[in-house]
């Protein structure tokens, strides 16, 4: 695409990335876009086709487009939650608490359910301009195995989870994210019995600032090509639910991330 087409492309992307155009929202018509942007109809259609191929836009009707990412499925009505009558602690320290919770599920006899409560965790997937993701090769004694992980760690009291993600990248890898981080999801990795909120963030670009400062958590630092992720997954060398969530998001959204603000050397 030529300079004017690229300008139109980046303008529409900015509308989407900033939330000015929201998921499911129709974008202006081709005629209106032609008035708003420095591009003619033929070139504009090439721009829109690229945004469709990248998964940012969806064709809606014969000649209109809407922002991808809307949700069509409805939340089911009439499904009852479990009633909680109380809980008691069996064990606790700063890392892990074990509780017995008195629960009353619909249609099931009331009973006590074990719940393990862990810390709030933030994880970061940082990608460079060569389509590589910043990872650590670590040994984990619980499964007694080596594997690749995204940097991440516990959110300190009062700390913003996004700040945690950036801090952990720096402490564990010696690289500092140069661009803003974006939260992609918050999830529970073992929702049936373990309470441990995980948040995953993505970012583009990082600068080398020195050696890792977190000796306990540091491992071998590597910029791993995204093209290797499927193979590493098949080999069982990806460790942790947060790592799998972050990497699968990157694979599903390749081409949709904003350009890096700086190159990873």
Image (tube, rainbow, N blue to C red):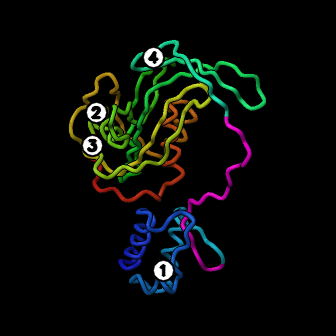
Compute the Cα span from label 3 to label 2. Answer: 9 Å
Residue 149, percent from left and from top? 43, 33
Residue 172, percent from left and from top? 31, 32
Residue 210, percent from left and from top? 21, 36
Residue under label 1, please give it: 44
Crowd tier of the residue under label 1, counting other residues whose Cα lies within 10 Å: few below 14, some 14–19, many 20 or above: many
Q: Is residue 119 above or below residue 126?
A: above
Residue at the extreme top of the image, as rendered: 90
Q: Secondary structure at mark 3?
A: strand
Residue located at (52% from left, 12% from top): 90
Is there a contact, CB below 8 Å, between mark 1 and mark 3?
no
Residue 42, percent from left and from top? 50, 84
**Of pointers 1 and 2, the one earlier in the residue sequence:** 1
Is 113 inside the magenta-drawn segment?
A: no
Q: Which residues are magenta?
A: 62-81
Residue under label 3, please give it: 176
**Of pointers 3 and 2, the one earlier in the residue sequence:** 2
Compute the Cα span from label 2 to label 4. Answer: 21 Å
**Of pointers 4 and 1, the one earlier in the residue sequence:** 1
């Amino acid at each position: 695409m030529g300079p004017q087409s690229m300008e139109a492309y980046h303008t529409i992307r900015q509308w989407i990335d900033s939330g000015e155009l929201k998921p499911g929202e129709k974008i202006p018509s081709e005629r209106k876009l032609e008035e708003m942007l420095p591009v003619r109809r033929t070139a504009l259609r090439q721009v829109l086709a690229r945004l469709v191929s990248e998964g940012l836009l969806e064709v809606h009707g014969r000649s209109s487009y809407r922002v991808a990412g809307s949700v069509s499925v409805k939340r089911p009505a009439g499904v009852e939650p479990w009633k909680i009558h109380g809980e008691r602690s069996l064990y606790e320290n700063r890392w892990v608490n074990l509780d017995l919770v008195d629960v009353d599920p619909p249609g099931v006899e009331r009973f006590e359910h074990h719940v393990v409560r862990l810390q709030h965790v933030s994880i970061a997937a940082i990608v460079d301009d060569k389509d590589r993701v910043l990872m650590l090769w670590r040994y984990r004694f619980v499964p007694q195995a080596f594997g690749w992980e995204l940097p991440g760690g516990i959110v300190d009291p009062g700390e913003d989870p996004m700040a945690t993600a950036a801090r952990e990248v720096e402490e564990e890898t010696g690289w500092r994210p140069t661009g803003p981080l974006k939260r992609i999801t918050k999830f529970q990795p073992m929702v049936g019995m373990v309470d441990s909120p995980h948040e995953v963030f993505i970012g583009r670009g990082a600068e080398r600032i020195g050696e890792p400062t977190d000796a306990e958590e540091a491992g071998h630092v590597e910029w791993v090509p995204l093209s290797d992720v499927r193979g590493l997954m098949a080999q069982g060398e990806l460790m942790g639910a947060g790592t799998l969530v972050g990497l699968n998001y990157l694979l599903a959204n390749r081409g949709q991330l904003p350009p890096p603000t700086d190159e990873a050397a």
